[in-house]
Amino acid sequence: MNWEAVVFWAMATLVLVPAFAIVFSRNIVHMAFWLLGTLMGVSGLYLLLGADFLGMTQIFVYIGGINVLLLFGIMLTRSEPVYVRRLAKRPKLAPGLIIGAFTAFTLVSALLGAGWRNVPGEPTETAGILGAFLLSEYILPFEIISVLLLVVLIGAAYIARRGSREGAE
């Protein structure tokens, strides 16, 4: 077994163990921290596959931005810890298992049916190629999306503050 296989299985474990911990955790803050582990594992898998831009984007955007925003949102909107209720009845377990099995079957069949191939001569460094496109040909959509995300963050903060003021009155 070579080092890439060892790193792959370590990253796969880093994805799956926190994912199961998210499912079985009851505290929403703990869920957000387990999500951090899962996102780090996905980033590691991207980097192992040679998709350096996706791996670093995963780190900067999802780990550095979205997860921190999620934690701040939880902390700013709740004064006490939020616990997820356990289901009193289990009537939704069977449909959930059926849908999960169907989704797993579809994903496995798509993966096995894909024509995976290595193209010789293809560039392996994606960050430079994507950076050149984003800063030349696609600069306007890139900036529009960044302004849109800023407006969404300001709106979310406004709604959170307005809701906390209304609850205090």
Image (cartoon, rainbow, N blue to C red):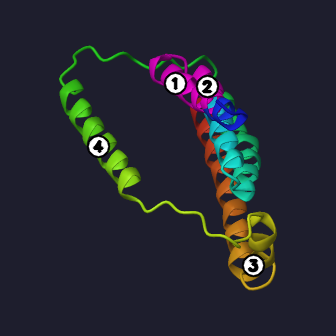
Marks 2 and 3, the one that precedes in the sequence: 2
Q: Answer yes or no: do the residues labelled 2 and 1 have beta carbons within 8 Å? A: yes
Q: Mark 2 points at which residue?
A: 34
Q: Name the residue under label 4.
A: 105
Q: Is residue 147 left or right of residue 9?
A: right
Q: Answer yes or no: do the residues labelled 2 and 3 have beta carbons within 8 Å? A: no
Tell me: residue 140, above or below residue 5: below
Query: From this viewpoint, which residue is outermost toward the bottom?
Result: 137
Given this view, does label 2 or label 3 mark the residue nearer the observer?
A: 3
On the image, the x and y values in percent for residue 20 come to 48, 23
Quadrant placement of the C terminus: top right
Q: Answer yes or no: do the residues labelled 3 and 4 have beta carbons within 8 Å? A: no
Cα distance in 3D space between marks 4 and 2: 26 Å
* Residue sitting at x 66%, y 48%: 46
- Give the quarter of the image for residue 155: bottom right
Q: Residue 109 lies in magenta, yes or no?
A: no
Given this view, does label 1 or label 4 mark the residue nearer the observer?
A: 4
Within 10 angstroms of label 3, few (less than 14), some, or many (20 or more) residues? few
Q: Answer yes or no: do the residues labelled 4 and 2 have beta carbons within 8 Å? A: no
Q: Name the residue under label 1.
A: 22
Marks 4 and 2, the one that precedes in the sequence: 2
* Residue sitting at x 58%, y 26%: 13
Please name the amino acid that badge 3 sits on. Answer: Phe
Cα distance in 3D space between marks 3 and 4: 36 Å
Given this view, does label 3 or label 4 mark the residue nearer the observer?
A: 4
Marks 3 and 4, the one that precedes in the sequence: 4
Please name the amino acid that badge 2 sits on. Answer: Trp
Q: Name the residue under label 3.
A: 133
On the image, the x and y values in percent for residue 102 come to 25, 42
